[in-house]
Amino acid sequence: MSAAVPLHPDAVSERDDLDLRQRFQSLDALLAVHENFWKPRPFEEVLPNWRHTHPELYNAVISLSDTVVESCSAEPARFQAIAHPFLPWLQELARASELVAAPSRSLTFSPFDALHAPGRKWRQVTAFAAALPPLSGPVHDWCSGKGHLARAVADANNVELFCFELDAQLCESGQTLADKQKLPIRYIRQDLLQPFDSRREEYRGGWRLGLHACGQLHVNLLRASVDSAADGVAIAPCCYHKLCLGEQYQPLSKTAREAKLTLSLKDVSLAVQETVTASAKERAQREKESQWRLGFDQLQRQLRSQDEYLPTPSLPKAMLNGDFNAFCAWAAREKHLTLPTDIDYSHFAETGRSRYREVRRLELVRHLFRRPLEIWLALDRALFLQERGYEVTVREFCSREITPRNILITGQLL
Ligand SMILES: C[S@@+](CC[C@H](N)C(=O)[O-])C[C@H]1O[C@@H](n2cnc3c(N)ncnc32)[C@H](O)[C@@H]1O
């Protein structure tokens, strides 16, 4: 079992103590005042309005070489350095978005568990488990999947665990793995979007964990934790915009309800637009799809005589093995448009490629706000817990190469 050592107090810098509310308000003011740089989407709007107020930035960005664009996409700090002379307030934005690394306990995990989880997932799980304080039970792992996290936590803490998961197959194979090791974990098939009485006697107290539970699911987790007066909560949120009702983002905390910024769920999706974990093949496919969509976008603007973006549904993946002409035929059918027979497809395919080159460059500017927006959202969750009597920290539990969704919010009931 585990060999826990005390946390290293030195690992926590002074920045960590920055008042969460104050930090939220600085980010809020910066994001709101500069929203013309990040709310409009270059994919949908042919030219950004900010080019009139910042023509030098526009020219510098548009003329970046492919090699520089590639390295800036992989390493956002590179583009920050390029943009900084044009946008001096970027430094303040970066400062407000910095998080310290969570102190990490040195834990020993069973080799059996490592064998049964994919490599990167296991690194996320062990980093998350090591960043938690010693836990009281029962521990609930929300949206547990097969329960890799629960098994790691069981390796490191002497507690009873419940895994809540929608997928029956995952519950079954998770239970088999846990039973093989005689771990005290019970899998419960549960739709966590539905009302669920977490105040039942057997669930009371203890800790609630959620590693990469999407949008509304981790919001429900926070609400259920607070309602049942859980001793502690630890979440690494992801897909902040998913599974939520309506089109507008609903702030959780009182502070965020009084914020300057108002967000649509589409705005919120910027926070998780990052592809560091995508394979080269996935990236190439995404590139092809984007170029086709942009080519079709120019075609539909001409056909409809309307200079506005027309969203198309998600693409059947097999279609990417076909060609641009077949894609246009499919997209036109989906949007009830009739394509004339004399379309110059090679012209629109080329337009798609050149729009894509432009969009990638303009997206670099938009992406300067991606992490600040994510921190804004994380702080909304943190403040929600704080307002309900929890002592809260917001830190990074691993490097962004292991997962870009590396923010750990912990709350301990005071
Ligand atoms: C991104 S995975 C995270 C799994 C696990 N926590 C991990 O990090 O490996 C999200 C999990 O949420 C589960 N899920 C999706 N919708 C759900 C719902 N409505 N109720 C419960 N679980 C759900 C999925 O089946 C999936 O296993």
Image (cartoon, rainbow, N blue to C red):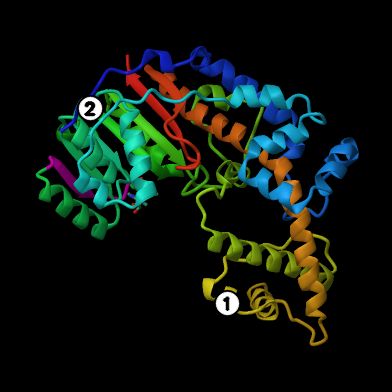
Looking at the picture, how far across and down is residue 354, in whole percent? 79, 62
Looking at the picture, how far across and down is residue 248, in whole percent? 58, 42
Residue 206 tag number: 2
Q: Quadrant of residue 205?
A: top left
What is the magenta range?
A: 183-192
Amino acid carrying mark 1 in the image: Asn
Eyeballing the image, is 243 above or below 200? below
Amino acid carrying mark 2 in the image: Gly
- The residue under the point 76% across, 35% down is 82
Lateral position of residue 354 relative to residue 91, left or right: right
Residue closer to the observer: 224 or 105: 105
Looking at the picture, how far across and down is residue 31, in whole percent? 68, 30
The residue lying furthest to the left in this view is 182
| Mark 1: secondary structure | helix
Residue 321 tag number: 1
Lateral position of residue 170 relative to residue 292, left or right: left
Residue closer to the observer: 339 or 147: 147
Q: Is residue 175 visible?
A: yes
Mark 2, ligand 1, within 8 Å: the answer is no
- The residue under the point 66% across, 73% down is 331
Quadrant of the rendering where the N terminus is positioned: top left
Q: Is residue 193 visible?
A: no
Mark 1, ligand 1, within 8 Å: the answer is no
- The residue under the point 24% across, 58% down is 168
Q: What is the crowding at mark 2: few (fewer than 14 residues within 10 Å), some, or many (at least 20)?
A: many
Q: Is residue 276 magenta?
A: no
Q: Nearer the viewer, mark 2 or mark 1?
A: 1
Q: If you read the primary sequence from the N terminus, does the residue marked by circle 2 or circle 1 appear first?
A: 2
